[in-house]
Image (spheres, rainbow, N blue to C red):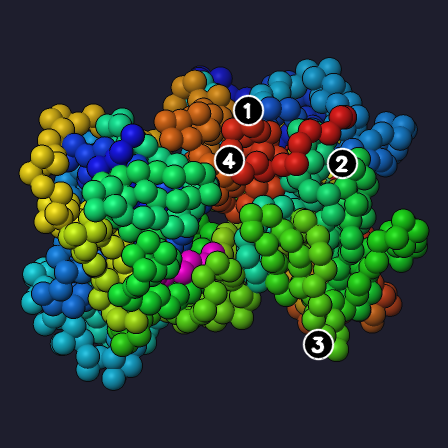
Amino acid sequence: MVADVLVIGAGVVGCATARRFALAGARVILLEKGADILSGASKANSAILHTGFDAPPDSLELACMQAGYAEYLDIRERFNLPVVETGAMVVAWTPEEQASLPAIADQAVKNGVRDIRRIGPADIRAREPFLAESAREAVLVPREHVIDPWSPFLAYMIQAQALGAEFHFLTQVTGGQFDGETWQVETNRGPFKARSIINCAGIFGDRIEEALLGDTHFSIHPRKGQFVVFDKLAARFLKTIILPVPTERTKGVVLCRTAFGNVLVGPTAEEQEDRLRITTDETALQALIARAVEMVPALQGMGVTATYAGLRPASDKKHYRIRVEKDRHWITLGGIRSTGLTASLGIAAHALELYRTLGHGEDKALQPVADPPVFPVRNLAEDRPRDWSARGNGGIVCHCELVTRREVEEALSGPLPAGDYGGLRRRTRCGMGRCQGFNCQAQVARMSEGRLRIPMTLGEVKP
Amino acid sequence: MTDTIRDVAIIGGGPAGLSAAMALREAGINDIVVIEREREAGGIPRHCGHPPFGIREFRRLYTGLAYARRLVEEARKSGASLLTSHTVTGARMDEDKIVLAVATPDGMTEIAARRVLIATGTRETTRAARLISGERPLGVFNTGALQSYAYLEHRRPFERPVIIGTELVALSAILTCRTLGARPVAMIESGERPTAPLPYFVYPRLIGIPVLTETKLVDIIGRPRVEAVRVKDRQGNERDIACDGVILTGQFTPEAQAARLLGVEIDPATGGPAIDQFGRTSHPAIFAAGNVLHPVETAGWCYREGRSIARFIARDLQSGLPEAKAALPLSAEGALRYVVPQRIVPGEEGIGHLQMRVKAAASGTLSISQAGKVRSSNAISRLPERRLTLSMPDISTEGGAVVVTL
Ligand SMILES: Cc1cc2nc3c(=O)[nH]c(=O)nc-3n(C[C@H](O)[C@H](O)[C@H](O)COP(=O)(O)OP(=O)(O)OC[C@H]3O[C@@H](n4cnc5c(N)ncnc54)[C@H](O)[C@@H]3O)c2cc1C
Ligand SMILES: Cc1cc2nc3c(=O)[nH]c(=O)nc-3n(C[C@H](O)[C@H](O)[C@H](O)COP(=O)(O)OP(=O)(O)OC[C@H]3O[C@@H](n4cnc5c(N)ncnc54)[C@H](O)[C@@H]3O)c2cc1C
C-alpha cells in the first residue's frame, strides 16, 4: 500500500502523531527501529505534565504544551489514564534564587498560567512539612501534575491501530527517494511507500533529514539525564513536585512523586556525543541522592528502587525544530528536548495543520473518522484500583508492584503486545519494584517465551 | 470472612514460617494458617537446587528443592492450613485481633487472627540499590532470579556471566550456572579477601574461574544483552571482561514489606522488624522469625528459630508471656552492624542468645554493658557475614539500656 503518511519513530511524538493522523482519516505507517514503542528519549523522563508556566512566551513550544495538556485532560478518562494532581513549587533556596522568583511568576502569568501564587516559608512548610528549612520562598503552580509516562502512548497507538495504522518494529529507516509524488523509504526490512513523511526520530532527527533529504536544518546534541527512584516509603515525605529555579541550560534537578507511588530525583544534564550508549554513573547518582536529601532530609538512608537515564533530543537551538518541505511532502518534528511528554498531543495536532499545507493537491484531502473507537488501558497508577484486587486475575506474579498474571498475559498478547522486556515492564510494571525481578523475572521470561521480539532467554534447558 | 478468628496467621511459607506452623500445632494450638504469596510454599529453598539442606532437621541430606517439598509435606501433615497465591496487602488492628487484607486470584479477602507471625525472609540487594554504573541490558540480576531461571523455569538466561561478590551464595551461583550449562568467567570482589571461608575457593580455582579481589565493577556494556563489564583493580587500572551476564550476589536485605504494612517498628540496622527475646515486635501480638530478622542465616537456623518463636506464641496464647512493656532496649555499637533481639525483658531466657554481625573484619573485646556498667566481656575475632552469637546476658531489671560493643 501507499500510505498517506509515514511516521518515523515511535517516541511520544511519533505515537501521538500516528494517532492524530489516523483520527484524521489518513492511512498511517509507523516505522520504529526499537523493539517497542517509547524505546528512545521517551522511555526515561520525569513524567511531569507541565502547564508551560516557564516555557518561552509566545513560542510554538508553549502552544503545543498547553494544547497537549488540555487534550490529555480531556481524553484521559475515556482511556483510563491517570493524573496525579500534585501541583509544583519552584523553590528558592538562596537569596539569588529568591530574587528571580518575581520574574518566574510574571512569566507564568504572561503564559496564561494565572493561578500561580508566591508563598512564604510558613505556607511551604504547611504544604510540605518534610522540606528542608532552608526553603525561603516558592512559586506554587497548582496545575503541574504527574502522569504515567507510558500508558497514554500505548492507548493512542492501540486506537491508531484500530483505525488501520500499521506499525513495524525493529525497522530502521536508512534512506529514501521522492519521485515528486511518492516517497519510497528504505529500511533493513525492505521498502515502504508513502505520499508524505513525518520525521519523529528524536535523537536521530537530523540524521534522518540527511539520509532522506540530503541536508539537515539542525544538529542534535544529546543531553543525558539520570534519575534515582526511591522506595515507595519515601512517598509519605512529599506530595508536591519540587522544582528548582531553572538556569539557562536546564530545568534543573526535580524531586517528585511518580504515578506509581515512588519518589524520584533527577535529571542531571550532561552533554554527550554518543547517541546510543546511555549509562548511569554511580557518582552522578550519589550526587542526586545527596541533592534529594538536602531538599528533604528525611530521605537520608532511603532505599533506592531504580536508577535510569535518558537522552534528551536537544539541538543547537532551544526551540522545537520544525521543518516543512511542501514540495517534498515532508515534516520534521525535531529537537523536542524536554517537554515532549506534555506537548506530544499538541505537536501532533500542529503537525496535522502543517500537513494540510503540503503540496498534495485537493484530491488527497483527508476524511476525519466519525466516532473513533476508544480502548481503555489498564490502570498502573497507585491511587486508582488495579487488577490485583480484582477477581480472576490469575494471581500475583510481581509481588513488589502487585502485577497479576492476567496483566502480564494481556501485555504479551496484545493489542500491540510488548516487544521486549522493557516494553513488558512499562506495560505492566513487573520487575520495576524493590526487588527488581529477584522473584518474578524468571517466571516472566518463561511466560514471554516466543512472544517478544527480543527474547529474554537463550532457550530451554533440560531439567 | 472475619467471623472466624484464627489463632495464628503466619505470613510467609519458608523454613521459618512452616516450622513455626508445625511447632504451634505440636504445642496444641489448633487454628493455624500460613499465607504464602507464591504458587508453592517452601521459601528460598524452593529454588536452591544444591545441597546441603535438612541435615539437622530431618537427618537427611537434601537439595533445597527436596527440602522445601519435605517442609511443605510436614506442615500439611501437622494440620496447619496453607494458603498459596495469597499476598498480604494491608492490615487493621482490632482490640482482640489483627485483620489482614489478603489479595488472592479470586479478589480480596480478610484473615483475622489473634497472633501474627511475620516470616517473610530476605532477598539480595539489586543492581539499582548498589548504584552500579553502566547500561541496562538484559542479563543483570541477583542469584535468586538465577536460581528461578535454573530450577523453576528451566531457562538459560546467559552462557558466560560474571559473578559479583564472594559470599557463600556466590559459590552456589557457580553450581547453578553449571546446571544451566553456563560457565562463569570471573568472580569479582571489591574487598581484600573473599567473604566466604577461604577453603571454599578451591572450587572456583579448580574449575578455572578467576577470583578477582580488590576489584570493582565500574561499567556494564551492551545492548540489548550484556557484552562486557569494565572492572577497576586496586591500582586503578581498568579493563574489560567479555561476558553475557552479571550475577549480583548477596548483600542480603530483609523482605520487610509485610512488617511495614503491619506498622511494626523496623530496626534500621537490620532492615527488619525489631523484636524482644520472644520474637515479639513493637506490637505485642505480632511476632517475627527467620531471615526477615537478620540478613542472613541458613535455612536450618531459620527452621529452628521458627520453632522456638512458635513456642513463645503458643505460651502467649495459653498462659501469657511477660509484659512486653518491661523490655529494655538493646543496641549494637562499634564494629557491630546489628544485634537481634533489639529489646530484652530482664530475667527471661527467651531464644537464649544474641545474634550479631560485624561491619568489617574485626577483633577485640565484645562487651555487654548496662547503664555504662560492663556486665560481661569476651575476646573475639570475626569476619563479615560470619555468625556471631552470645548467650542471653543476665541483665538487671533496675535497668537502663543495654549496649553490646565490639
Ligand atoms: C531526562 C528527561 C526528562 C524529561 N522530563 C520530561 C517531563 O517531565 N515532562 C515532559 O513533558 N517531557 C519531559 N522530557 C521530554 C520528553 O521525554 C522528550 O521531549 C520526548 O521523549 C521526545 O520524544 P521524541 O518522540 O521526539 O523522541 P524519541 O522518544 O527519541 O523518539 C524517537 C524514536 O525514533 C526512533 N528512531 C530513530 N531513528 C530511527 C530510524 N532511523 N528508523 C526508525 N526509527 C528511528 C527511535 O528509536 C525512537 O524511538 C524529558 C526528557 C528527558 C530525557
Ligand atoms: C538467593 C538466596 C540463596 C540462598 N541460599 C541458601 C543456601 O544455599 N543455604 C541456606 O541455608 N540458606 C540460603 N539462603 C538463606 C535463606 O534466606 C534461608 O535458607 C531461608 O530460606 C530463610 O527462611 P525464611 O523462612 O526466613 O524465609 P524465606 O525462605 O525467604 O521464605 C519467606 C517466604 O515468605 C513469602 N512472603 C514474603 N512476603 C510475603 C507476603 N507479603 N505475603 C505472603 N507471603 C510472603 C515468600 O514468598 C517466601 O516464600 C539463601 C537466600 C537467598 C536470598
Do the residues bearing badges 3 and 4 touch, measured as CB atoms within 8 Å?
Answer: no
Single out the mark in the foreground, 2 or 1.
2
Q: Which mark is residue B85?
A: 1
Segment colored magenta: A308-313
Q: Secondary structure at mark 3?
A: loop
Q: Amino acid at mark 2?
A: Leu
Above or below, A456 against A393 in this view is below
Q: Which residue is mark 2?
A: B180
Neighbour tally class for label 3: few under 14, some 14-19, many 20 plus, Cα within 10 Å:
few
Q: Distance of mark 3 from mark 2, alpha carbons?
A: 34 Å
Q: Which mark is residue B236?
A: 3
- On the rendered structure, is A256 left or right of A119? right
Q: Quadrant of ligand 2?
A: top right
Single out the mark in the foreground, 1 or 4.
4
Q: Nearer the viewer, residue B277 or A178?
A: A178
Name the image quarter holding the C terminus of chain A: top right
Q: Nearer the viewer, residue B251 or A207?
A: A207
Q: Main secondary structure of the magenta part?
A: strand
Single out the mark in the foreground, 4 or 2.
4
Q: Which residue is mark 4?
A: A453
Pointers 3 and 1 within a single chain = yes
Q: Amino acid at mark 1?
A: Ser
Which residue does the image show at 45% across and 69% down from the upper left? A273
Chain ID, mark 1? B
Pointers 1 and 4 within a single chain = no
Chain ID, mark 4? A
Q: Nearer the viewer, residue B323 or A327?
A: A327
The percent position of residue A25, horizontal first and vertical second, equals: 16, 32
The percent position of residue A211, horizontal first and vertical second, equals: 36, 56
Q: Amino acid at mark 4?
A: Arg
**Residue A161: quadrant of the picture:** top left
